[in-house]
Amino acid sequence: MVNRPPRIKDIISGIILLAAGEKEPLPLEKVHEIIHAMKSHESILSGLRFSVTGAVCYSRDVDQTISFLADGGYLEIVGGSAFLGEHGPEFRDYLSRFLSNYQIETIHSASLRFHERVRRDFRGSRKDT
């Protein structure tokens, strides 16, 4: 293990991958918005930048991370939702090569809060339709 500060891409990857499931969809339309809302409460997200225009939230870092995860087989994108990809379970091993257990647990804790917000927001938006 090299133990270095996690890069924002690693943090976002961990949060998304630990929240993604093989059968439960992770709606990509909500990812930017929820991570933006979490930023003020999660110090681990302090380096993340967003553009906010009206009701639209966008982060190039989040977008690039989702593309990286999909290209690497960690996420599978189907119809605007993400699912855990073929290599998704290997991501924790990838992180453990250079992050401490404490850093990984911090990312995991943020992911649990992210997942809860996605479930709550996604469930709420499905009731509206």
Image (cartoon, rainbow, N blue to C red):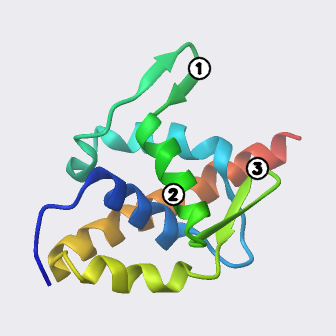
Query: Mark 1: few, some, or many residues within 10 Å (few <14, many ≥20)?
Result: few
At 68% from the left and 69% from the top, the residue drawn is: 83
The circle drawn on residue 55 is: 1
Question: Could you say where residue 87 lies in the image, as x and y percent from the top left?
Answer: 56, 81
In this rendering, position of residue 71 left or right of residue 1: right
As helix, strand or loop, the secondary structure at mark 2 comes to helix
SS at mark 3 in the image:
loop
Q: Secondary structure at mark 1?
A: loop
Residue drawn at x 52%, y 40% as measured from the top left: 32
Q: Residues within 10 Å of mark 3 (few under 14, many from 20)?
A: few
Q: In the image, which disc is placed on residue 16?
A: none
Label 2 Cα neighbours within 10 Å, binned few <14 / some 14-19 / many ≥20: some
| Tag 3 residue | 80
Q: Is residue 23 visible?
A: yes
N-terminal-most mark, 1 or 2: 1
> Disc 2 designates what residue?
68
Would you say the residues marked 2 and 3 are in contact, meaning their CB atoms lie under 8 Å apart?
no
Residue toward you, 39 or 48? 48
Foreground pick, 9 / 118: 9
Q: Give x and y (percent) for residue 85.
A: 64, 75
Q: Earlier in the sequence, mark 2 or mark 3?
A: 2
Along the line of sight, the residue nearer the viewer: 120 or 9: 9
Which amino acid, by three-letter code, is at mark 2? Answer: Phe
Q: How many marks?
A: 3
